[in-house]
Image (cartoon, rainbow, N blue to C red):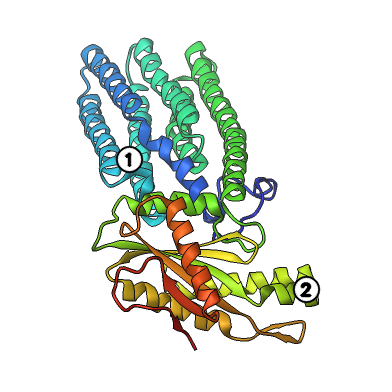
Amino acid sequence: MERRTPSPRARSQATVFARAADQLLPEAVYRDLVAPLFAMATPILGFGILYAVVGILVFVSWHSRAVLALVVCSSIVTAIRLLIIRGYHRAGGMTQEVSALRRWEKRYTWATCACAGLIASLNLVALGAPHPLVHLATVSLIFTFGAGIVSRNAGRPRLCLLGQTITVVPVSLGMLVHATRIGASTVTGQFFILEAILLLVVAAMSIESVRHLYQSALEHLTTKHDLGNLARYDPLTGLANRLLVRECFLRQAQSCRVDRQIAIHYLDLDGFKAVNDQFGHPIGDRLLVQVAGRLAATVRGDDVVGRLGGDEFVVLQPDVLHADQAELLARRIIRQLSDSYHIDDTEMQISASVGISLAPVHGLDLDRLLQCADAALYRSKRKGKAQVHFCDDPVPGDRGRVVA
């Protein structure tokens, strides 16, 4: 069961650039925000080529070894950025663990900051060039980089803030210093002052745009995530509903074979109707919530627990090597659910009956497997309840057993 997270409105009241804000995001939302970073191979390659072209033109017109060194460094950083994207996809893309995704994002951020630093360095070096067109060519890289980072990386606002700061602030300060050296009252000096102010204003506007784009994307993705949860989780117990159980089974069935079976446990609560009749549906609902909690605590991490409706539950147990493993889990479930319950100082006693079908032994159609397990469940109830039976058990002599 996924933990609840603050609403988009609550999150929007905090700064979107805070590192801690990412810790509040649902995993699915974080994955959706990070994924676009690693779909930018073509723009990164294109910008690397553009940097090289501008740098070579500057070198041809000025013959500065520093410019040539920066072009070489830019080519290396561009290659690293492309290798990071390739490595991310080869490692599994957005299906990786969140901790792995954070490591990939950190690498991407460092490489992007290195690229921003090279842009700033080229502009600072170009301030000493004798031709104004050289300076205009290098400044165009700042605007191109800024537009790209805002449009493509708005889902990671800290990255945008770092990129804009690294490219704009040093260059703007360098322009102001250069203007004072050549004379702030001259036309050229005034031009550099105006251009420095323009860069800072555009950067501030870009950062504000990123803030709005991020909040909009966050609200959209969170709503999408919440609607997905509503469609796949039981609202009372928080367990998987029939739709999510089916999706999980289809994923597990891809690796299902005779020596790695999936056990489908169909559960029904014995005595639940009497509790509902005696204490009312609100108490019955609270009892179902406790049952769900016990089920979730009894199974393994790879098992799937779902509620099909009423007092009927299902457990998908993958990687079953032998039917005995499924029976052991069923016995453990029955023992856990048969312990007494306490609601409002009232002690209640119920038990559970279990029917089990096995995939692929009994087929790979989930509806058929559930019907088969349901039939075995009612055999358990007819034999005295708190028992477990297999569907058309292929193991000779294996009969339902009462679980104490």
How far apart are the alpha carbons under marks 1 and 2? 65 Å
Residue neighbourhood size for the residue with mark 1, other residues' Cα within 10 Å, grouped as few (<14), some (14–19), many (≥20): some
Give the structural element (helix, strand or loop) at label 1. Answer: helix
Residue 310 in the image: state x and y as whole percent: 65, 62
Identify the amino acid type marked 1: Ala
Q: Which mark is residue 400?
A: none
Residue neighbourhood size for the residue with mark 2, other residues' Cα within 10 Å, grouped as few (<14), some (14–19), many (≥20): few
User: Relative to residue 17, is residue 115 depicted above or below?
Assistant: above
Evaluate whether residue 157 shows in this view: yes
User: Relative to residue 126, is residue 395 depicted above or below?
Assistant: below
Residue 59 in the image: state x and y as whole percent: 23, 17
Q: Quadrant of residue 198?
A: top right
Q: Which mark is residue 111?
A: 1
Q: Which mark is residue 277?
A: 2
User: Relative to residue 61, is residue 78 depicted above or below?
Assistant: below
Q: Going 32% across and 18% down the picture, which residue do you hit?
A: 129
Q: Could you tell which of marks 1 and 2 lies nearer the N-terminus? A: 1
